[in-house]
Image: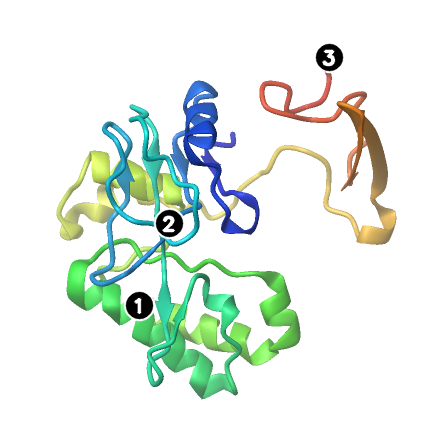
Amino acid sequence: QIVGFRAPELKPGGDTMARALQENGFLYDSSMIETGHPPRYPYTFEYRKESFCHVQPCPYDNGYPGLWEIPVIQWQHYRTGDLFGSPYEYTPFNFDDAKKYFQFNFNRHYEISRAPFNINIHTRWFDDNPFVFDALTEFIQETLELGDVYFVKQSQAIQWMKTPIPSQNATLFDLFDCPSSITLPGPEPCFIGEANNCVYDVCGEKIAMQTCAPCPPHFPFVRNTDGELGE
């Protein structure tokens, strides 16, 4: 089930985007880059948005009850103070630089506001800098040793905000459970060379996608995620 949305290239679509997300039953958006001094908590669109976001347009005209925003908090370099909309916009020099980068930005959340700390990453960052993955792995392992830090999905963070409980009881909270094995729906994973190339004509535009499953008869979309329904 898809409950969240992120605009391509972190370029939000203003009130039109927020209205579409609300009308289609999305729980949250996470497209708006905001200043992190102090780091901000996720918030709702029950009323008109007042806070500033760095990439326009943002939805300022109306409220959208039921829709949440998980802001993309800017990351900061621990030495230069340079700000980045996403962590992978910075290229660390080596393992130690990457490790300090993760730790510094986590501490800004952990020690100042305790707002959820998003780690928005891209595989290209790891492909070009394998030591960044090693630094992230070690950072996660050390952070979990704090005893009051949990790595959860964004939807789980929102559910916790709706039903907050003391950290000592968090292990009893179903939303924080991590099953030892998960059976995912859909086809078995495949290599890119084995994937099916599917091409569709959508409103006069050719759209291509790759999938390990047989190509659905129609392009998958909102309210037609399996592509079985015609236009």
Which one is closest to the eye, mark 3 or mark 1?
Answer: 3
Quarter of the image holding residue 228? top right
> Where is residue 187, by image quadrant?
top right
State the separation of the CA atoms marked 3 and 1: 46 Å
Under tag 1, what secondary structure?
helix
Q: Vertical placement of 79 versus 171: above or below?
A: below
* Residue 47 point in image, percent of width and height: 23, 29
What percent of the width, then of the height, locates residue 120? Answer: 46, 58
For mark 2, give the secondary structure: loop
**Residue on which disc 1 sits:** 106
Tell me the element at label 3: loop
For mark 3, what is the residue?
Answer: 231
The residue under the point 41% across, 38% down is 29
Label 2, label 1: how far apart the Cα atoms are: 15 Å
Question: From the viewer's perspective, is 141 left or right of 169?
Answer: right
| Mark 2 residue type | Val
Q: Earlier in the sequence, mark 3 or mark 2?
A: 2
